[in-house]
Amino acid sequence: MQNQRTETPLLETRGLTKIFGSLRACDGIDLAIAPGEIHALLGENGAGKSTLVKMLFGVLDPSAGEILWKGKPVRIGSPGEARATGVGMVFQHFSLFEALTVAENIALALDGKVAIDRISEEARRLSLEYGLPLDPSAHVADLSVGERQRIEIVRSLLQNPELIILDEPTSVLTPQEADKLFETLAKLKAEGRSVLYISHRLEEVQRICDRATVLRHGKVTGACDPRQETPSSLARMMVGGEVAEISGAGLGEPGEVLVEVRKLSAPARTPFAVALRDVDLTVRAGEVIAIAGVAGNGQSELFDVLSGEVTVSDADSLRIADVPAGRLGITARRLMGCSFVPEERHGHAAVPNMNLSGNLVLSRYASDREAFLTGGWLGLISSGPVAAATKRISAAMDVRKSLEDPPAGSLSGGNLQKFIVGRELDRQPRVLVVNQPTWGVDAGAASRIRQALVDLAKSGSAVIVISQDLDEVFEIASSISVINEGQLSKPEPASSMTRERIGLLMGGFHDGTGHGTETAEAAHAH
Amino acid sequence: MRIELQKRPTPSALYAVLSPFIALGLTLVAGAILFMALGKNPFDALYSFFIEPLTEVWSIHELTVKAAPLILIAVGLSVCYRSNNWNIGAEGQFIMGGILGSLVPILMPGFQSWLTLPLMLLLGMAGGAAWGAIPAFLKTRFNTNEILVSLMLVYTAQLFLDWLARGVLRDPNGNNFPGSIRFPSAAQLPEIMPSQGSAHYGILLSIIAAVIIWFMLRFTLNGFQVRVLGANPRAGRFAGFSQTRMTFFAFLLSGGLAGLAGIAEVSGAIGQLRETISPGYGFTAIIVAFLGRLSPLGAIAAGFMLALTYLGGEAAQMTLGISDKVGRVFQGLLLFFVLGCDTLINYQVRLVLRKAAPAAGGQG
């Protein structure tokens, strides 16, 4: 019914442009969102989606162009003005205080003084109405990511918006939680509200969106009805070319055991960290083991323990090539042939204001001591070999950069990630542990990184990939395990694993006997 | 309305270089206003404060005497601050270095050989390093705040020195004046050109130290560690560098250099252990380190600049008849403007006016 009223769009942009220095992040964007439609905004990372949305929500000022609300030009100068206009927004990264309750977090976002009881009541009413079960008196720290997202949604609904912007809402949800979100969106749509849905998941967009606008390099490359398109035609609009298929085929018979984790436990180091409990994992040469799971279930804790940034008291609980390694630090493990790629690029895997050659030395100074250091105890860094290796890695991984040796922070996320992965692959590690290898990386770079991981396993190394991206997991893994609340499910061959089963494991069903906070909802969703 | 600091996407490289000079200019302007408020001709005052000390040979010698400890301490502090360890107690480490090094000539006045001076310098370094090790230990072991601990240890060191100079180490033939015996010549850091002025070899020590530390920071894995752990502790941990070891390294190095400055001052400029041996060099060196952009070579230039404020203070007292505390005021102004300029290079000030709320009413 609502789709008929498309003659005056609820929100329209004409030639909307944002320039940062010499970069045109958004370049003449035309977009029209009809009342009561779910409109998808598709694009790779760095395509300009976030910039566009920030302009719509008053976080950034446009450099040129105009925004029309119900046909009239408006100036949205701040998020407050955006809310007053009728635009609500749910950010990808939640802005919640973990130590406060749900109701208190909501109260913080409201203008004016409203009694907390009234907020609780209102929040409870809204959450029931839209199928977003939420306890206003619960502390945010105790809630799952899905529940936290609901707080953000309820928070924006309290303002009674006519347009709700959701930024990558399902990237952190289990499949079951995502289904639940889609029901809520359908309800909003039925009430005549519009939704701007930002995603790069084609399948979802095709399933729930009425129209789609595709961005690439800051420009609109397509406006279509996603249901009339095929996933590959949408992908072409997004990427601008065919995306290379990963060939996982050819992973041979696994060889000797390279990593063996037995009953490994590690206590939580901060109140908001996750404790690891009785983790068992065996990885053989030539294998890619993927560890799936929703963010915040112990992935980074597991990575830290595997890498040796955090050691465990029982040396025997982690054996690398049959040597007890639980108490060895990261340098000792590197010297045993292991390499590591953490999730966070800036400030963990790399120092942003240091150039690439410095960042190469960062993880390789010990393993490549002979090549990179001279002068004996003086430990002089030999710039020649380091520069040569930087060049070699950049070429091998197709790292695009404007200077010979730029600061790491000046590279785009995908290019820096290619360099970081390349830095570790360059030494042909026997064991590689990667956390979220393609998080926030565009499709082209992602497929290159994935192929490199598969190739490494083919050459006889053991690869452990911790990833939230199920597509990725299925694309490259030979077996799959799921992490939930610090516990790891038994790895199963990728060929016999299904998305539904992973969804259940993510939700806390540990082989049908486990229990977790998500259990009730996961069951509810069926 | 409120004022916001907004991070600049690309800080200007030009202004990053110019920043210390702009700060210097602003300090001069502020100083001129200050002198005017005191009823002095600002140009005459600035001339006698900043230029006059440079017009005579003996006062240039004085300048190096003041600059030597400032540079030595600031070089160590640069490394310390770059590695994200905040040693504010160089003054205390300076004093402890002076004390420990002085024990050689005071307790063994008969031991006079070519070994005396090197031994004193080594003990001076050891004293400063040991005093610096205390905040490092407490920080790494008990997670205490090194700023507070190192600062409080300054007062401990000052009072300890006072007690020694008036008590156990007092010269028995000194008519009850505080202060130790005068050091024998073998225990004194010699003057470079005794006929012209008082400059001693401390300045050479500080320039050698600056060059060595600069080389270390620039070319060695150790310097790389300092830079990584200072910029990103998490990345440093990923690299396998130990934060604990770095904290000790930074405090031992900066403490050791401050201690060396202390014994060089006592044996070169003073010639005996007195109840006070520093006009606040350890604190002024913090300004030197920042004015020199936390670079050891920058510290050399900045050290001379700040040394000038000491001389200028004295000159102002003599020729203008105003308190030599003016020197301190200039140091404070300089630090303020340096930090201010650095902040404005990385951030821009934005006035946020509260606009009329409803945008939907829209007249465009």
Image: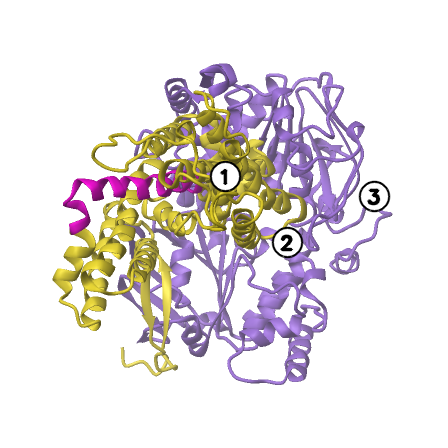
* Magenta-colored segment: predominant secondary structure: helix
Q: Closer to the camera: disc 2 or disc 1?
A: 1
Neighbours of disc 2 within 10 Å: few (<14), some (14-19), many (20+): many
From the top left corner, tell me how far across and down residue B17 is, in percent: 25, 45
In three-dimensional space, the C-alpha distance between marks 2 and 1, rounded to whole angstroms, equals 61 Å
The percent position of residue A167, horizontal first and vertical second, equals: 50, 58
Which amino acid, mark 1?
A: Gly
Residue B189, magenta (yes or no): no
Between A473 and A203, the one nearer to me in the picture: A473
Q: Position of residue A65 (x, y in %)?
A: 27, 64
Numbered mark located on residue A173 in the image: 2
Q: Are marks 3 and 2 in contact (CB under 8 Å)?
A: no
**Left or right of residue B228, residue B22 in this image:** left
Q: Which residues are magenta?
A: B52-78
| Chain A, hue in figure | purple
- Residue at 37%, 18% in the rendered image: A384
Q: In this structure image, what is the colour of chain B? A: yellow
Q: Quadrant of the N terminus of chain B?
A: bottom left
In the rendered view, does A208 fall on the left or right side of B271? right
Which of the two residues, A466 or A86, is positioned nearer the viewer here? A466
**Residue B63 is one of the magenta-drawn residues:** yes
Looking at the picture, which amino acid does disc 2 mark? Leu
Give me the chain letter of mark 2. A
Residue A88: which disc?
none
Residue to which mark 3 is pinned: A511
In the depicted structure, whether residue B152 falls above or below residue A260: below
Residue B252 appears in view = no
Q: Residues within 10 Å of mark 3 (few under 14, many from 20)?
A: few
- List x then y, in percent, for residue A363: 52, 28
Q: Quadrant of the C terminus of chain B?
A: bottom left
